């Protein structure tokens, strides 16, 4: 049944009660969030509560005190391993997924750690270890970096994602 057709609008189901929703006109995005599907698949917009942990159990992020994460499967807005774990899940289902670096934020790359002469930094910046900065690339794009070492004439910055090279558990 084509999405948006009168028949589809009459048959669309809402929430755990699975009562039909009837729209006099085309459904809005706010109506879409109540659609229940048998299994999440590519193209579905899903809402997921999660807790992200490192392999040692350290929590690095959680939606517990926030709204659930909403994304569309197949758009690449979340890491590949998380999307793969959600694909095929049913409403109300819980699961644990272990995501290797290759399916997460990638392996840690030594070529993303750079030593920069202090005079290349803006004068108003006093670099400190752990400080987050934005590195402006020649094409105008900026990427986040973290200061990992400060020497007399140079500063070492790391452009790896903080979770690169780590096994993640959701």
Image (cartoon, rainbow, N blue to C red):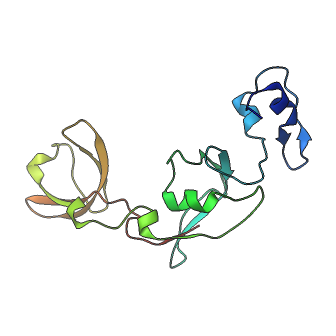
- Where 22 sits versus 68, above or below? above
Where residue 160 appears, as percent x and y from the top left, is 31, 60
Q: Residue furthest top?
A: 25
- Where 19 sits versus 52, above or below? above
Q: From the viewer's perspective, is 87 left or right of 7?
A: left
Q: Residue furthest bottom?
A: 56
> Who's the residue at 75% across and 28% down the image?
4
Q: From the viewer's perspective, is 127 left or right of 95?
A: left
- Where 10 sits versus 42, above or below? above
> Who's the residue at 50% across and 58% down the image?
80
> Who's the residue at 42% across and 68% down the image?
101
> Who's the residue at 36% across and 59% down the image?
161
Q: Residue furthest front?
A: 1
- Out of 65 and 74, give the one closest to the viewer: 74
Q: From the viewer's perspective, is 166 left or right of 31?
A: left
The answer to whether any part of residue 67 appears in the image is no
- Out of 87 and 97, give the one closest to the viewer: 87
Quarter of the image for the C terminus: give it.
bottom right
Where residue 135 appears, as percent x and y from the top left, is 25, 46
Quarter of the image for the N terminus: give it.
top right
The answer to whether any part of residue 154 appears in the image is yes
Q: From the viewer's perspective, is 14 left or right of 129?
A: right
Where residue 50 appears, as percent x and y from the top left, is 63, 60
């Amino acid at each position: 049944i084509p999405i948006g057709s009168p028949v589809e609008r009459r048959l669309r189901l809402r929430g755990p009660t699975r009562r039909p929703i009837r729209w006099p006109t085309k459904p809005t995005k706010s109506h879409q969030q109540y659609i229940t599907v048998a299994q999440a698949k590519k193209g579905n917009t899903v809402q997921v509560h999660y807790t992200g942990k490192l392999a040692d159990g350290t929590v690095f992020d959680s939606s517990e005190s926030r709204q659930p994460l909403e994304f569309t499967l197949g758009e690449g807005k979340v890491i590949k391993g998380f999307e793969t774990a959600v694909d095929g899940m049913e409403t109300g289902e819980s699961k644990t997924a272990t995501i290797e670096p290759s399916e997460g934020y990638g392996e840690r790359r030594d070529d993303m750690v750079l030593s920069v002469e202090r005079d290349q930094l803006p004068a108003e910046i006093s670099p400190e270890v752990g400080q987050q900065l934005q590195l402006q690339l020649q094409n105008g794009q900026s990427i986040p970096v973290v200061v990992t070492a400060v020497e007399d004439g140079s500063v070492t910055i790391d452009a790896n994602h903080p979770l690169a090279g780590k096994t993640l558990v959701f």
